[in-house]
Amino acid sequence: MLYRHLGKPIFFKMDPEKAHHLVIGGLNKAAFVPGGSAAMRLMYGVPETADMAVDLFGVHFPTPVALRPVWTKMRRRSAASHPSASDLWKSAQ
């Protein structure tokens, strides 16, 4: 309820990267407040089930891991600094 009426309107007006860092930073700080981690787990925690667990690169994750946004962002940076062969071909003509 609080998020829907207060947080969401504020975060959706912000730059997405800034909103992301603000929320992640806030969640990180909540972990240091006594009882903060337990409260977050109680409100938003998902019980671990064997069918959802993922082992990736030797690390166990209780829920699926999504890497696509990171890879997409890295690919965009790479493409900007390293043009593709077709881009080089077009510029040479």
Image: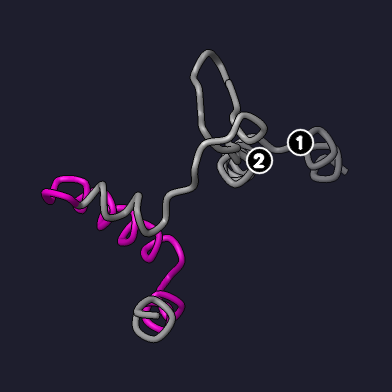
Q: Which mark is residue 4?
A: none
Who is closer to the viewer here, 76 or 2?
2
Q: How many marks?
A: 2
Name the secondary structure under disc 2: helix
Residue 58 percent across, percent down from the top left:
52, 13
Task: Specify which label sits upstream in the sequence, 1 or 2.
Answer: 2
**Residue that numbered label 2 is attached to:** 79
The quadrant of the picture occupied by the N terminus is bottom left
Q: Determine which quarter of the picture holds residue 13.
A: bottom left
Residue 9 lies in the magenta-colored region: yes
Please tell me which residue is depicted at 25% across the width and 47% down the height of the picture. 37
Horizontal placement of 14 versus 76: left or right? left
Comparing 10 with 32, the one in front is 32
- For the residue pair 35 and 21, the one nearer the viewer reads as 35
Tell me which corner region of the image, top left, top right, bottom left or bottom right, holds residue 76.
top right
User: Is-magenta flag for residue 24?
Assistant: yes
Question: Left or right: where does residue 84 sit relative to residue 78?
Answer: right
Amino acid type at mark 1: Ser
Q: Identify the main secondary structure in magenta.
A: helix
Boundaries of the magenta span: 7-35
Identify the residue under disc 1. 84
Q: Residue furthest left?
A: 34
Whether the residues at callouts 1 and 2 have beta carbons within 8 Å, the answer is yes
Vertical position of residue 75 compared to residue 20: above or below: above
Q: Amino acid at mark 2?
A: Ala
